[in-house]
Amino acid sequence: MSRIGKKPISIPSGVEIKIEGSKIFVKGSKGELSLRLRREVKVEKDDEKIVVSPGKKSKNTKAFWGLYRALIANMVKGVSEGFEKKLEIRGVGYKARVEGENLILNVGFSHEVKIKKPEGIDFSVEKNIITISGVRKEKVGQIAAKIRDIRPPEPYKGKGIRYLGEEVRTKVAKKAVASGS
């Protein structure tokens, strides 16, 4: 039995859930999301809870049971509260700004790096902190990872783009050997 799949999902006020055949629609104050369900999973709506149970038996039924319970819980949280990731820029002359729909990064290259805003994602910059927010957890995390990959923190001085609160282990720099003749 799936430990995650057994837990019911509570529906906060202001969130509407509609199940039509093999699709589930979740609507809230932040937006609307939908998900196609697999045959291995059954979703039922009680009064203020969603119960996910195993459907058609297969080799991966337990895995899909827990997975779809987590995906639906993330959808409910996303449309009611939303998700956000914060990135920190460290380095002399490194900065970011939002210009129209794009995020512009100056991170030590000879040119500015422009990141086009995907649908459903919002960027905001305050000093050296970039905030990525949206209703889909997967998309927010993916965009944050792409931005971090532009200039990951380097191990000697620690400059670059990192998640807020991320610890980067720094290495000791090599020392010049004095030639003694």
Image: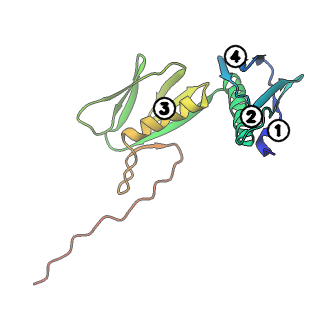
Which of marks 4 and 2 precedes in the sequence? 4
Q: Residue 77: which quarter of the image?
A: top right
Q: Which label sits on residue 143?
A: 3
Label 3, label 1: how far apart the Cα atoms are: 30 Å
Element at label 3: helix
Label 2, label 4: how far apart the Cα atoms are: 21 Å
From the viewer's side, name the closer residue of 82 and 157: 82
From where the camera sits, is residue 167 visible? yes
| Amino acid type indicated by mark 3 | Ile
State if disc 2 and disc 3 touch (CB < 8 Å): no
Residue carrying label 4: 29
Outermost residue to the right: 47
From the viewer's side, name the closer residue of 32 and 168: 32
Residue carrying label 2: 69
* Residue positioned 23% across, 35% down in the render: 110
Q: Residues within 10 Å of mark 1 (few under 14, many from 20)?
A: some
| Amino acid type indicated by mark 2 | Arg
From the viewer's side, name the closer residue of 57 and 119: 57
Q: Residues within 10 Å of mark 4 (few under 14, many from 20)?
A: few
Label 4, label 1: how far apart the Cα atoms are: 24 Å
Which of marks 2 and 3 precedes in the sequence? 2
State if disc 3 and disc 4 touch (CB < 8 Å): no
Say which of marks 2 and 4 sits in front.
Answer: 2
Label 3, label 2: how far apart the Cα atoms are: 24 Å
Say which of marks 4 and 3 sits in front.
Answer: 3
| Amino acid type indicated by mark 1 | Lys
| Amino acid type indicated by mark 4 | Ser
